[in-house]
Amino acid sequence: MSNIFKTALHRTRAKHLPPIEEIEAYGADGEEAMYRLLCKSFDCVLRNPVVPHKKLYLEKDFLVIEKGIPFVIEVKNWKGEIGTQGSDFYQKKPNGVQKKQKSPVGTTLQFIEKMKSFYSLPEPVYGIVAFTEPDCILHLPKEMQGITLCTAPEAVAFVKAQTKGVKTSSDTPDPSRILRCTRFYSRDSEFCKGILADCYFDCNTPQGSVVRIDTTCLKYLSVEPQPLLLRDKLYLTYTNGATDIFYNRDTVFTVACLDGSYQKIALNRIRHIVF
């Protein structure tokens, strides 16, 4: 079968994904609010950093690097009263329903340990669990196992307090080395996680002009196959919230997977990308 017919077949069989909010909590209100707050306060804010772990990876919501000091931040948008029961957390919702929640402290500690090992980072690396729901009531200690537990504004204040008077270190981790995971979806499932090695790809405007897209400025990319035209319609959402529509025929992305291997992924295999 020729490549043209294979491509047409891929696009014919393609299915649309459900709305992005159903497959990815990336745009959750709590994380969005925290991201805006952190960006107003600090220059180096990385979203969804990952570190290798066995054959997979560990991931946290944010990494702030301020004056060379890393702060790993996990966001919880839990409503109601938040407290602890043994090693677990509980959430008592406004309607009176109480729900047991897995402690975010252990996973944050594990991420810090792996991050320090992978990047050979010196002390200190701070961990924060930030509760971003404005009306939540915390019945928690200020810290557990060295991890700070606080509200979103208190997280910003904590970072500033720990870096007050600190001179910028020459050992500052290079933000470009912090692994940020790109998620690729085909049909209705996630099939690849890794680092997108391509900073640019070319596509066409509806008028036929060639446009070069900077992938580092993208937040989402949705693909609508057009099998009879042997092309894909691309819906782009940028990090600043702007959107565009373009067309593409034969782009192939190179993805550096977290196990050290590489994959070549044709855009016509993809239904959605979360950057």
Image: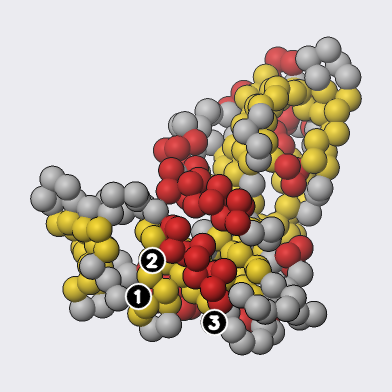
Identify the residue position indicated by label 1 in the image: 142
Looking at this view, is 125 or 13 the one in front? Answer: 125
Which residue occupies the extreme right position in the image?
210
Badge 3 crowding class, 10 Å Cα cut-off, few under 14, some 14 to 19, many 20 or more, is few
Badge 1 crowding class, 10 Å Cα cut-off, few under 14, some 14 to 19, many 20 or more, is few
Which residue occupies the extreme top position in the image?
207
- Residue at image coords 32%, 70%: 103
Relative to 155, is 63 on the left or the right?
right
Q: Is residue 83 visible?
A: yes
**Label 3 SS:** helix
Dot placed on the residue nearer the N-terminal end, 3 or 2? 3
Q: Quadrant of the N terminus?
A: top right
Disc 3/disc 2 C-alpha distance (Å):
21 Å
Looking at this view, is 133 or 218 the one in front? Answer: 133
Disc 3/disc 1 C-alpha distance (Å):
21 Å
- Residue at image coords 39%, 60%: 151
Identify the residue position indicated by label 3 in the image: 113
Name the amino acid type tagged 2. Answer: Cys
Q: Position of residue 205 (x, y in %)?
A: 80, 19
- Residue at image coords 77%, 27%: 248
Name the amino acid type tagged 1. Answer: Lys
Identify the residue position indicated by label 2 in the image: 150
Disc 1/disc 2 C-alpha distance (Å):
7 Å
